Amino acid sequence: MTSIQSMHTALSGLIAARKRVENASHNIANASTAGYSRQSISQVAAGGGIVPRVFTPSPVEAGGVITVGVDRSTDALLRNRLNVASDAAGAAAAGAKYLERVEGSLNEPSESGLSSQLAAFWDAWGALSVSPDSQAARQQVLDQGSMVAYTFHRIDTEMQDTLAFAGDELSQAAVEVNDLSQQVANLNAAVVAASPGSSERADMLDQRDLLVERLSYLVGAQQSMRTDGQVAVYVGGRLLVDNATVAKMKATTTQMTWEDSGNPVSAGGYVGQLHTLINQTIPALRTQLDGVAQKLVTDVNALHSAGKDTSGNVGNLFFAPLGTTAASIDLSSDPALGVSGHPERLAAASATGGVNDGSNANLIGDLADATNGIDDKYHAYLATVGTSTKSARSKADAQELVLSSAREDLKSIAEVNVDDELADLTAAQRAYQASARVITTIDEMLADLISHFGRVGS
Amino acid sequence: MRITQPAAVRRIQSDMQTARANRTKASDQISSGKRITRLSDDPAAAIDALRARRELKRSEAYTRQAADADGWLTTYDTSLSTIADRLQRIRDISLQGQNTGTAGPEVRASLVQEIQGIRAELASISDQRYLGKPVFAGTSEPANTFSGAPAYNYQGDSGTFMRTIAPGVSMQVNVNGEDVFGTTASGTQVFQVLQDLETQITAGNSAGITTGIQNLDTARERIETIRIQVGVKQNTVKYIQDQRATVEMDLRTQLSNAEDADLATASIDLAAADIAYKATLSAASKLFSTSLLDFLR
């Protein structure tokens, strides 16, 4: 090896050290960039690192260090686990968010909840049974009846608003999913074009992982790596992103569909849970509430129409008989039989009782205690909502923990630790100083050779 | 496991979040006094609380009905004792009238006059009202309960006033006028008996007076029986009113157990959460103050 070659060797050391400084600075700069994976320089000794082959003899004379490329610190298995956890966490988050909203619209236990309103309604009938001749007691029954109907309307309207809100979220999710898939496709193309082992390529892979993770959360997407570095992204068994091709999604008010075929997307994650909520959970809760309203209308009307009003008429209607849903329940405004605006039509007396009889009002008030009656039915409904909200919330909490543990596991490998980078930086600085010293030394040796060679005794 | 600075920061942040949440939860319980503010906090206890609340509301209704029942029964008790008192007097007068030896026509005339007075008084008792409702006329509203003199026909109906004074305990609180004063068909209707006695005493018919007194005794027995029944009902109402108070207390305890916060526990929780929060903050301040940068020069 010649001295000049040694100089080159030292120069390669200088360059290698500079690259390590560059790498450390890139890592430190991205220490808090979302999704960034720590990069490390892969360097091999020149000569020793390349396996000699028959027809390409190794540059035996060469020395120094060669920078092979940039490695990303990540783990495919942990990345996959994170995507699966995102899918489950998305579904659980949607469930908890919507059920808590439904629970909130019931507003129980409180003075304005339906259970308090029903109690006041039964109480008003009880008061009327004691003083059927009191105009105030009659008006009180009508007012409480309207309050009960109004409370049913309010709850149902809020549930409809919740459904509409879920529909809005669905269309926002469609826009976001299309945007994300397009970005994944663009990155696929860019990754193929980028030079292998470059820091830029590693950065692109990080970005793509982050996009796919978000897609997993939104629609339960899964990715599979291709040999050329591109990914295929699947949703419900269909390709969402195939290299640079994207299948678009489109939201209707009730579900997410594929834009080309119009078939529903069998999505997981947040959107998958929205499908269940919009098409099953919330409608079922509305139907169950309708059942309570229907029971109220049927039971009260059956007793009421058997009683007698102050003019001796039998068969008056308290609730409009056709309004048997939470949205449509109302006092009957039938011109001949309806009680709305006609307190004197309240049938406080039994069919055989006299004008001072209040026994029918008493019977209606006693509906409060009826076994499997209206109150029991409503309490059963509240129990359904309460327990499903509770389990949805604890599921969301648990999935959030699973997700954050999966994320921490990946980050423990991928994340930048500034202390580590500072140590690397210092080491690289020392290596640079040492290489520089080697060059100085060789330079001095050459100077000795050139200036002093052949001179004797001077 | 490799621990990076951001990981340590996140961990501290999440610990601080947890400590803050625990602290808020404990202080919320103390300030609101409630353990449950949403159904999903504890669905079973929330439903229990709703049930207890409904039972309490119903209990108020029972209390009101019981008070009303008590009012009715007290009215009857007073009226019936007055009636019994007056009929006793009639019996004395009749015996006096029967004693023809001492009772001359003038004396008999004055006796008859007293009976007539009492008859008018009884008629006015039969028209007595409680809270605007005639008490002896069933559920109807006639001008006079017994009218169409001299026949004294019953003008009311057989309607009943039922009061639910406890769950499943329904009680008739009114007494029908015909049950007290008797039906025309029975021959012992109080007003008829009185009119007969007046006639017999005026005529000085001793045997007729005896029959009259016998009829009067039948009527008095009937009224005594009703008085006893009213008295029994009054006792029942009183007993149930006392019992309702105990039941209400139980319900309030139940409600409180279901939804009220245990202040002692909540205070200890708050203190513990506070200590945990301060410890987390102190750990955070130490953790962030150290870095390799401090030692590189």
Image: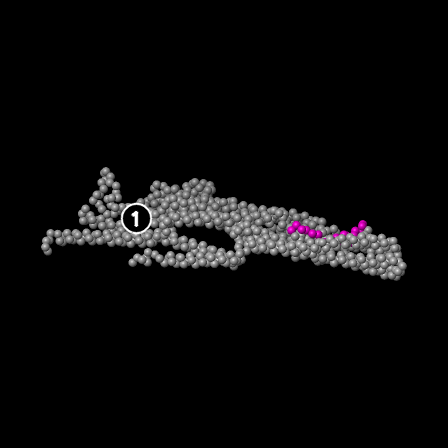
| Residue sitting nearer the eye, A81 or A253 | A81
Q: Residue at x 39, y 45 (%)?
A: A78
Where does residue A107 sit, x and y in percent of width and height? 54, 53
Q: Check residue B184 for magenta coloring.
A: yes
Kindly state the secondary structure of the residue where label 1 is placed.
Answer: strand
Where does residue B249 sit, x and y in percent of width and height? 61, 56
Where does residue B266 sit, x and y in percent of width and height? 51, 57
The residue identified by callout 1 is A41
**Magenta part of the protein: which range?**
B167-186
| Residue sitting nearer the eye, A414 or A353 | A414
| Residue sitting nearer the eye, B239 or B61 | B239
Within 10 Å of the Cα at label 1, are there few (<14), some (14-19), or many (20+) other Cα atoms?
Answer: many
Determine whether, in the image, residue A456 is placed left or right of residue B281: left
Amino acid beneath label 1: Ile
| Extreme residue toward the top, this view | A54
Q: Check residue A294 for magenta coloring.
A: no
Is there any visible trace of residue A114 in the rendered image? Answer: no
Q: Residue at x 49, y 57 (%)?
A: B268
Chain letter of disc 1 in the image = A
Determine whether, in the image, residue A29 is placed left or right of residue B181: left
Q: Can you tell which quarter of the image residue B220 is in?
A: bottom right
Q: Residue at x 36, y 47 (%)?
A: A74
